[in-house]
């Protein structure tokens, strides 16, 4: 005589499967995010090495700052982006892509049809303005020339603290969220429309590339704020009255 499952037994099995799924799915999600973060740091290290190779060929001078230019799409011959100067040293466009890059709300108006910063601008990594050479009437950001009084050439030897100077970083960090950055007063991402830029990429942190070529994951505001963003040694959260929004060197340089 064949014995079938009773309804109670079937419900118990279903309940056990549901409990296991509730336990394991977050673990799988964390493992997947960790793998993407590892890939991001790997790409970032190659970019850091590309910068070192570039300055060896250009008399110690840092590449020219160009960022967020979407009028001419990425990788077109006339596109302006710092990643264009570094491309010959990596030979791969994908190196400038963070696997966690899923774009942000600003792209819908600035680069319609794109779903990532890499697709919109050519890089998932944000370039720190004050760590790169800025050329008057040539360095562009958001399709407009930078508002600078004169050309500022930055050489590697000018960088005061290369091991802690942030030259590039992931565009999004989880602590840019408005629940942590109240009224977007410190980082300026999760703000009311139309200045809402924030979209979560990773739940724990983001990638930072330093002037000495190394890269790492940054997970805390304390670490992020203490990183230098100006070649003369000014830290991200150091006061700077010239910046009228944040009042810090972050606002002027990051």
Image (cartoon, helix red, strand yellow):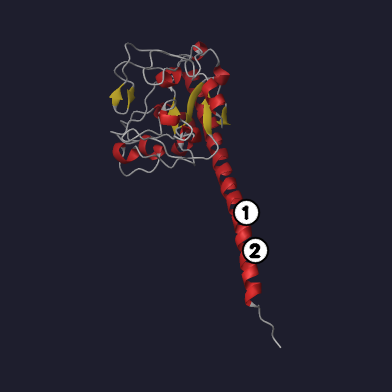
Residue 249, relative to residue 183: is it above or below? above
- SS category of the residue bearing label 1: helix
* Left or right: 1, with 51 as reference point: right
Q: Which mark is residue 198?
A: none
What percent of the width, then of the height, locates residue 17? 62, 63
Which residue is more in the foreground, 25 or 208? 25
Q: Residue 147's image quarter?
A: top left
Which residue is more in the foreground, 135 or 144? 144
Which residue is the extreme one toward the right?
Answer: 1
What percent of the width, then of the height, locates residue 28? 59, 51
What percent of the width, then of the height, locates residue 205? 54, 35
**Residue on which the image places disc 1:** 23
What percent of the width, then of the height, locates residue 78? 30, 30
Residue 239, relative to residue 46: is it above or below? above
Q: Earlier in the sequence, mark 1 or mark 2?
A: 2
Q: CA distance from mark 1 to mark 2?
A: 11 Å
């Amino acid at each position: 005589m064949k014995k079938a499952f009773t309804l109670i037994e079937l419900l118990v099995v279903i309940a056990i499967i549901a409990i296991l799924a509730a336990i394991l799915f977050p673990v799988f999600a964390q493992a997947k995010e960790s793998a993407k973060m590892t890939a991001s740091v790997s790409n970032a290290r190659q970019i850091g090495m590309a910068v070192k190779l570039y300055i060896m060929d250009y008399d110690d001078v840092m590449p020219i700052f160009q960022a967020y230019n979407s009028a001419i799409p990425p990788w077109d011959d006339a596109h302006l982006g710092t990643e264009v100067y570094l491309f010959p040293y990596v030979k791969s466009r994908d190196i400038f892509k963070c696997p966690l890059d899923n774009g942000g709300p600003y792209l819908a108006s600035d680069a319609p049809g794109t779903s990532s910063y890499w697709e919109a601008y050519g890089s998932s990594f944000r370039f720190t303005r004050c760590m790169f050479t800025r050329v008057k009437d040539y360095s562009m950001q958001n399709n407009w020339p930078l508002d600078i009084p004169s050309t500022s050439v930055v050489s590697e030897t000018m960088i005061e603290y290369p091991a802690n100077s942030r030259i590039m970083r992931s565009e999004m960090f989880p602590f840019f969220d408005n629940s942590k950055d109240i009224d977007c007063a410190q980082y300026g991402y999760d703000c009311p429309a139309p200045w809402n830029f924030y979209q979560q990429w990773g739940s724990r942190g983001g990638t930072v590339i330093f002037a000495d070529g190394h890269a790492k994951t940054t997970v805390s505001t304390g670490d992020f704020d203490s990183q230098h963003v100006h070649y003369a040694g000014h830290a991200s959260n150091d006061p700077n009255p010239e910046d009228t929004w944040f009042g810090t060197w972050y606002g002027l340089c990051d």
